[in-house]
Image (cartoon, helix red, strand yellow):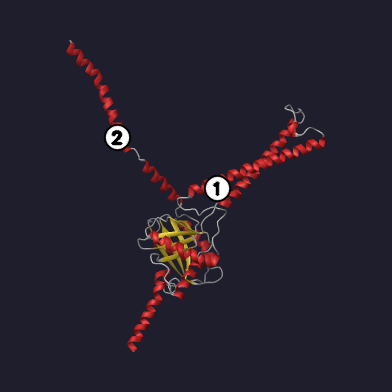
Amino acid sequence: MVGEDVQSSTRTFQPRIIAYCKLSVTVCRMGKNKRSRKYYIQSSKRQRRSESALGPNMTGFMCTCNDHERDCVREAYNILNEFADQMYGKEEFGGEQKPIGDNDEEHAYVNVKNTVENNEKTVVKEKTDDFVEKMENVKQESGECPVSQKTLDPPVDNASDSDEESLDIEAAVKEDVSVLKKQSLEKYKHQRRFQQVHCGAKNCVFIRTTLKDPLPLCVAIMDDILQNHKQWTKKLLRMIPVHNTCKAFPEDIKKAAERLAKSYFEKESKTYYVDVKIRNNNSVKRESLTASLIGIIQAANSKNTPELKSPEVVFHVDVIKNVCCLSFLPEYFTKYTKYNLVVLANMNKEKNAREDDICKEHA
């Protein structure tokens, strides 16, 4: 009998033991698969990077390099800032605000928020003080007691009038606060003249700019290299000014190309060439896009003629992932050698070496 009781008790407790073991195993697995703190930190960094990524309606410079992107960015900043200071003056910052970098976005946002809140408090306080002074003056002129000495139970007849006046003043204060908020945000929201954004392609760096037209700055850099025979960059190879960016859909590209073509070929006709490059994108077809762009340029000015060897201007279209960069580049194949800064610097060296060789042969 005792053995039977023991067997029955073990049978009753056996399902509970099995369930407990399964629960402990699942808990252990959850502990092993739980995300670490480092994972969440990295994910937040990725989100910040996505916010500072290449998108539509941007102007800037597309720079290419060979496996040295950091050095490329540094050289691009140096050369762009130096020539921009000569052409447009030095960059000014509002107040004591420091330049906003990748790691300083949160601090800058907190500073802007604090300034806006402080301005709101000061405006509300000034409005209420002015209202109290006006009410005291009115009461004194009418012979009644001032606001500071009025009783707790005001007359019933004037209650509705005072409520309406207070509502009007509150609405006016809210309007002034909203206007001040917009002004302060526009004042303290500062963008650097040149700021790197992630474009999503290897050996490609996009430098966003606040300049309306980046082409004159790029042309000034290349003319200086040709005149002074000075090599400014080693890792930065090509610098292509980008007039506008849009989403990499055929309809969006056509609309943006129409706007740029009308503004560029409005005054005179030129010989042109359409150069299309596609990176990390399989949805856009090069042949169909080139044909549609040629039709757009012809529609902008019927006197435009295509040229393959030495066109006056090249319509450069660079599709990178889900963004398309559009730009008109004069003397792309002839004078500026595809906007390659290193080749421009070495052109004169090669000419001088050839001349020296010829002189030695004749001597």
Measured as percent of width and height from the top left, residue 359 is found at 36, 86
Confirm whether residue 340 shows in the render: no
Depth check, front residue: 90 or 271:
90
Q: Is residue 196 visible?
A: yes
Determine whether the residue tagged by mark 1 lies in a helix, strand or loop. helix
Q: Are marks 2 and 1 in contact (CB under 8 Å)?
A: no
Q: Which residue, given by chain and number where applicable, does mark 1 sit on? A: 112
Neighbours of disc 2 within 10 Å: few (<14), some (14-19), many (20+): few
| Residue 258 pos. (x, y %) | 51, 62
Q: Is residue 135 left or right of residue 213?
A: right
* Residue 239, picture quadrant: bottom left
Residue at screen point 39% across, 61% down: 71
Q: Is residue 23 left or right of residue 186?
A: left
Q: Earlier in the sequence, mark 2 or mark 1?
A: 2
User: As displayed, is residue 247 above or below residue 82?
Assistant: above
What residue is at 48 percent from the left and 49 percent from the top? 105
Give the quadrant of the C terminus: bottom left
Q: Nearer the viewer, mark 2 or mark 1?
A: 1
Depth order, front residue of 149/112 = 149
The residue lying furthest to the top in this view is 1
Q: Amino acid at mark 2?
A: Arg
**Quadrant housing the N terminus:** top left
> In this figure, which residue is indicated by the disc labeled 2?
29
Q: Amino acid at mark 1?
A: Val
Residue 340 percent location from the top left of the image: 41, 69
Q: Where does residue 257 sit, x and y in percent of width and height?
A: 49, 62
184 relative to 282 in the view: left or right: right
Residue at 62% x, 47% y: name it.
180
State whether residue 40 is above or below residue 156. below
Residues under labels 2 and 1: Cα distance? 45 Å
